[in-house]
Image (cartoon, coloured by chain):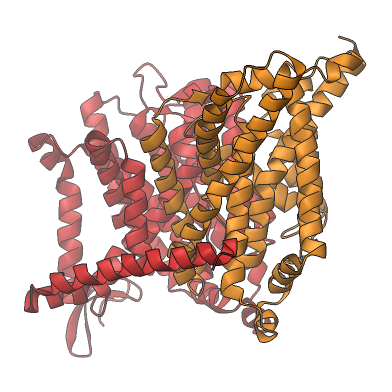
Amino acid sequence: MSNRSLPGLVSRDGETRVRVTKGLELTKRQSMLALVGLLVVFAIPDIATVTPSLQLTVVHQGLLFGLAAVGLNLLLRHTRLVSFGHAAFFGTGAYTAAVLAAKFDVASFSLLLIAAMVVATLVAAIVGYLSLRHTGLYFSLLTLAFGQLLYALVQGQSFFGSSDGLPVRPGAARQPLIFGLALDSEAYAVILYYLTVIILVVSLVVMWRLVNSPFGNALDAIGQDRTRAQFIGIPVQRYVWIAFVISGVYGGVAGALYAMVQQHVRPGPVLYFLRSGDILFMAILGGFQTLLGPLVGGVLLVFLQDVGRDVTAYFDALTGVALLIIVFGLPRGLVGSLRAGGLLAAATRDFRENPAVVGEWISAAVTGIVEATRNWLRDVQSILGVR
Amino acid sequence: MTGLETFVTHTLHGIQYGFVLFLIASGLTIVLGILDVLNLAHGELFALGAYVGFTIIGYLTGLVAPPTTLSTQLVFLGVVLLGAALTAAILVPVGVFLETTFFKPIYGRDEVYQIVLTFALLLIIKDVNKLIWGPSPLRLQDAYGGINSIPVLSRVGLTYPTYNVVIIVIGLVTVAGLFWFFNRTKTGRIIRATAINREMATAIGVNTGRTFTLVFALGAFFAGFAGALALPPRFASLDMGANPLVLSFVVIVIGGLGSLRGAFVAALLVGVLSRWAIWQYPPAELAAPFAIMAIVLLVRPEGLFGTWGEMG
């Protein structure tokens, strides 16, 4: 308890914990996991030079989409609003950086990033103002429609390069300058990666602070019951709107970094509504009831999509089946289910105790399919009026 | 072409487009209004309709004589429409299957799972289409040309495809049929009652589970019908479901959530206004419907006929 302002060790309930920031104290196990996780993330560029199957840009992209998913999760987890248009902010960030680089020859990394944050804030403020008038499914529907509006705008204007997109290669160096340094392309990729990791860690800590602040608690209250939250004096509309803007800014930052990593931005990969679906899926895949889940989901999905495209032409269907498994089998996501009491943890325990349990699972699956077919036939008969 | 003729042609194109939009959006809006599920896979059901229609209409038109004289032309038209109806009928068991297998277990769950589920179905159906019909776009060239060879509007000196006139007529009949169904038949009234108050409907003896299945099957029926009808003038392609899906959302928002009448007015509005926008300023093609939506949202957030769940 001695060290109040700096990260350090504290003792709680007779246990030593690592103090990261106010209120965020990790147990020994958690800090070990966090340390290992950080080390792996930091070692990725080195690992990538050894194995050809792991590419730095793929992990990098995964982290960025994961960051956008972390932003989306602020709405999803706390206010219970399902945004299906989050690619809009990712795309806004990416296109802000791209337009500044391609049309105005802005080369500074920090300037591009800050500009992307500002524009994403504005766009999120407007979209949020219009779509937050509704809740539930209609909110999802509106965010999707606004996302497609941005897609349509970019696609239709030659200023944005239409469907060919814009290059992000400003200045004499043909790439953004990090702290004014002109680096060769490999050094640029690696340094940008480490910068991303730093931004990511800062964003996660900020998000943690945010959701554990009175503001975050108010969002939870809104998510549980809007009317009640209104009655106990929470300015529901304004708080939800602020949360929406913050989550949009996360997307914008991720998008700007994405533009600088890829050095070319096209509307399809960053603005199309399937991308919004991907970002939402990342949050669900990793577990949207956790802080880190969306990030894990992001890296995993981008990696799997990269590998899967080489393996099969029907990769979308595989993603779909994976989604079905998550929805019906692991509703808490991977990170959520690995926790004690989760379905995945229980399944591994059962399997360890008695490997024959697999037989039971298979027979349960077969019974399920037979049952579903029988139900279907009965319902078709009932709809068609045949007895 | 005189200015007036251009205007009339564009307006007719807009009306035709509006009717196709309405066919798609009507299914989506009744599913949304009654099942409380935002079905992202609805656009893929439309695409599936187009693909099934490609096979069925292609097969059926191969059986009849080529449309050269008036009588063969009329037979040809009848066969194409029969094919579209059969396609829609095939989509009914597909809809029942999707509803009973995937949607039934999930009604009580958090809505994020419903959205993810329909997104999963979107991806799967898209790849099923790819598996069966292949990745390259398909076209029913003969059907469009064959029906257009029937002179209708050229008799009054207007160059306008006959097929589009057929779509407008079918659209009118379908709209009338839908309103009749929901206002005059027992089943339609049961569906409306379920939409307005699910618990009360159960209390007075409505089998809501069966009603839900029926509604979803109805949505699939109209999506498939729209897909088959929209096919002849265009290509059936894997990504054809996305745009109608999003435009249906726009139509639902403009018309008022859950209102069938609103969806009808909004579909025609979006169809005609976006057609005029393309005519006057082509780059606005994609953005025009969204601009209309934004204006309606600002002026009337509840939509033109916002009845919140009540049909009619």
Residue at the location (73% across, 25% down)?
B74
> In which quadrant of the rendered view does residue B22 lie?
top right
Image height of B231 relative to A142, above or below: above
Residue at the location (54% across, 78% down)?
A224
Residue at the location (51% across, 41% down)?
B48
Give the drawing colour for chain B. Answer: orange
Residue extending furthest toward the top? B1
Q: Position of residue A145 (x, y in %)?
A: 62, 46
Give the drawing colour for chain A. Answer: red
Specify whether A301 is left or right of A354: right
> In which quadrant of the rendered view does residue B167 lie?
top right
Specify whether B180 is left or right of A208: right
Quadrant holding the C terminus of chain B: bottom right
Q: Position of residue B73 (x, y in %)?
A: 71, 21
- Does residue A115 show up? no
Residue at the location (79% across, 21% down)?
B280
Q: Position of residue B118 (x, y in %)?
A: 48, 55
Quadrant holding the N terminus of chain B: top right
Image height of B254 relative to B195, above or below: above
Q: Position of residue A361 (x, y in %)?
A: 20, 71
